[in-house]
Amino acid sequence: MSFAWPVRVYVEDTDFGGIVYYANYLRWFERARTEWLRTKGYSQAMLAREPGIVFSVVSARVDYRRPARLDDELVVTCEPRPDGRASLRFAQQVLRGEELLAEGEVRVACLAAGTLRPVRLPEFVIAEVG
C-alpha cells in the first residue's frame, strides 16, 4: 500500500527561477520514508536504540518529469517492497494533484547500528511489506 506525505515548496527549495532544485526530491523521498515508518509506530532513533538497527540508502534512481515550483502543494508517496532478507525497495513519486512530477526507486539496507553490517529486517517490517 502506498503512503502519502504532503509538502509545500518553499523558497529554500528552489533555484533563482523558482524551480525546485533536483536534490530536494531525494530529501522529500527520505522524509516520506521516515514518516511512513512513524505511522507504524517507530522512529529512526528508537530503532537505533532497540533493536539496534539503522537503515542506509544503498541506491537511488529518480526520473524527473515536470518541474515543481515555488508555493506548489505536493504529495510525496512511498511504497515499500520486499528485496531480500536485509533490504527494502521503495517506489516513490512526487505529485502535484494528479500530475506526476518525479518518480524513483530507493533501496535501503537494514544494518546493525553498532557495526553497520547487514542484518535481517525486523518482523514488523516484513509483516508490512509481505
Image (cartoon, rainbow, N blue to C red):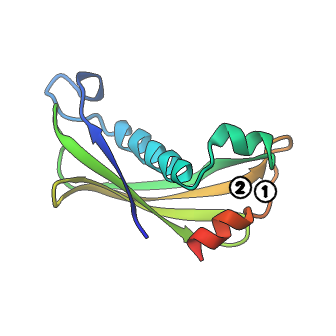
User: Identity of the amino acid at label 1?
Assistant: Pro
Which of the image's four quarters has the N terminus?
bottom left
User: Identity of the amino acid at label 2?
Assistant: Cys
Residue 46 rendering spot, x and y as whole percentages: 70, 41
Residue occupying the point 24% across, 46% down: 74
Viewer-proximal residue, 108 or 62?
108
Residue occupying the point 73% across, 67% down: 123
Does the residue at mark 2 contact the one at mark 1 (Cβ under 8 Å)? Answer: yes
Asked if residue 54 lies left or right of residue 99, the reply is right
Residue 115 rendering spot, x and y as whole percentages: 86, 43
Tell me: residue 3, above or below residue 24: below
| Label located before the other in sequence (2 or 1) | 2
Quarter-of-image position of residue 19: top left
Asked if residue 104 lies left or right of residue 14, the reply is right
Viewer-proximal residue, 10 or 108?
10
Circle on res. 110: 2
To which residue does mark 1 refer? Answer: 118
Q: How many marks?
A: 2
Residue that sits furthest to the front in the current view: 41
